[in-house]
Image (cartoon, rainbow, N blue to C red):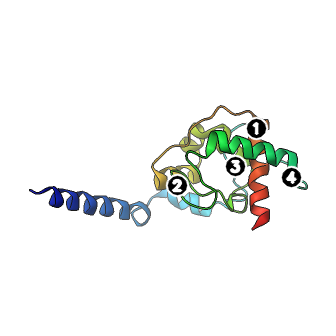
Amino acid sequence: MSKFTKLLILILLSLSLGACGESGKTGEADAAAKDVDPMSDTGVGPVSSVKLGDLDAGMAAEGEKIFGEKCSSCHKIEKRYIGPALAGVTERRSPEWIMNMILNPEQMVAENEAAKQLLMEYSAPMANQSLTEDEARQLLEYFRKIDLKK
């Protein structure tokens, strides 16, 4: 078998397995995830409530630095990469969910249906960067700044 044939078989196999990702999902867990309003889902972790006010430019600037140091190797703002694009994340997820995903990714993918679905879609677990709640809040503020510019 030629190298080209082997490569073609590998590509076709990858495409067929990838096609199973969304349409092949069934079961109670998937149905339950569809019934949950993503903006009311707070996730699993230490953050149960976040009070948002006007954008804090200082916090957003610190969040941008943290993003560059800790997050940008897996996430891009405007495009899918190893993880999802983060533009619009504050419109798709609650502030509590975002912070809990940053602070507690292992438990989130084990117990939160939306996080489980992201893991299935991206096939790469979110790395725990051992950030503090203050740092996670600064990242959230940076994401809010990005989303306000849209």
Classify mark 2: helix, strand or loop. loop
The Cα atoms of the two marked residues, 3 and 4, are separated by 14 Å
Q: Of the residues shown, which amino acid type is indicated by label 2?
A: Tyr
Mark sitting earlier along the chain (3/2): 2
Looking at the image, residue 6 sits to the left or right of residue 127; the answer is left
Question: Is 50 on the left or on the right of 11, as rendered?
Answer: right
Question: Residue visible at 64% across and 37% down?
Answer: 104
Question: How many other residues sit within 10 Å of disc 1, few (<14), some (14-19) or many (≥20)?
Answer: some
Residue in the foreground of this view, choosing between 126 and 79: 79
- Mark closer to the observer (1, 4): 1
**Most foreground residue, 72 or 107:** 72
Q: Quadrant of residue 106?
A: top right
Disc marking residue 110: none
The residue at the point 15 percent across, 61 percent down is 5
Residue identified by numbered label 1:
135
Q: Which residue is mark 2?
A: 81
Q: Is residue 49 visible?
A: no
- Residue 119: percent from left, percent from top: 50, 49
Q: Do the residues bearing badges 1 and 3 touch, measured as CB atoms within 8 Å?
A: no
- The numbered dot on residue 97 is 3
Q: Are marks 3 and 2 in contact (CB under 8 Å)?
A: no
- Tell me where residue 34 appears, x and y as whole percent: 58, 63
Horizontally, residue 84 falls left or right of residue 121, namely: right
What amino acid is found at the position of numbered circle 3 in the picture?
Answer: Trp
Side of 98 relative to 108 (left or right): right
Extreme-left residue of the structure: 1
